[in-house]
Amino acid sequence: MADAMTLETIQKGLCIELETLLSLKPGTITVDTSLPTLGVDSLRFVSLLLAIEQRFGVNLMKIGIKQDDLKTVVTLAAAVKAGRAD
């Protein structure tokens, strides 16, 4: 697959993607932000999945994303990292 990315790099990238998607100021979302509290609707969720696929080369639907993967940026980043290891 593509060059190795650290978990920290993925976490930072996810924060940026979420802030952009939700029109939030940079630094608003941290690795500990509860994703369910952000109020991401289904359309934005699909947009997030597409952004993750473009940025990280991981199709989370194909690898079987779980509800537990969507708790925080940390858990989502772990799923992305695991998907990159395939």
Image: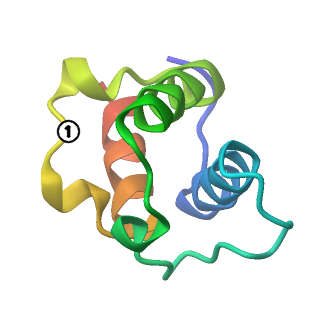
Residue farthest to the bottom?
Answer: 32
Give coordinates of residue 64: x percent, y percent. 14, 31
Give coordinates of residue 66: x percent, y percent. 14, 46
Nearest the eye: 64 or 29: 29
Mark 1 highlights which residue?
65
- Residue at the location (39% across, 70% down)? 72
44 sits left or right of 17 in the view:
left
Above or below, 83 relative to 72? above
Q: Residues within 10 Å of mark 1 (few under 14, many from 20)?
A: some
29 sits left or right of 79 in the view:
right
Give coordinates of residue 56: x percent, y percent. 57, 30
Disc 1 secondary structure class: loop
Give residue 65's quadrant in the image.
top left
Nearest the eye: 81 or 24: 24
73 sits left or right of 10 in the view:
left
Give coordinates of residue 12: x percent, y percent. 69, 60
- Residue at the location (42% across, 27% down)? 46
Above or below, 32 relative to 82? below
The colour scheme is rainbow
Above or below, 72 relative to 66? below
Residue farthest to the right?
Answer: 26
- Residue at the location (58% across, 60% down)? 11
How many discs appear?
Answer: 1
Q: In the image, what residue type sits under mark 1?
A: Ile
The quadrant of the picture occupied by the C terminus is: top left
- Residue at the location (20% across, 26% down)? 63
Above or below, 39 relative to 5? below
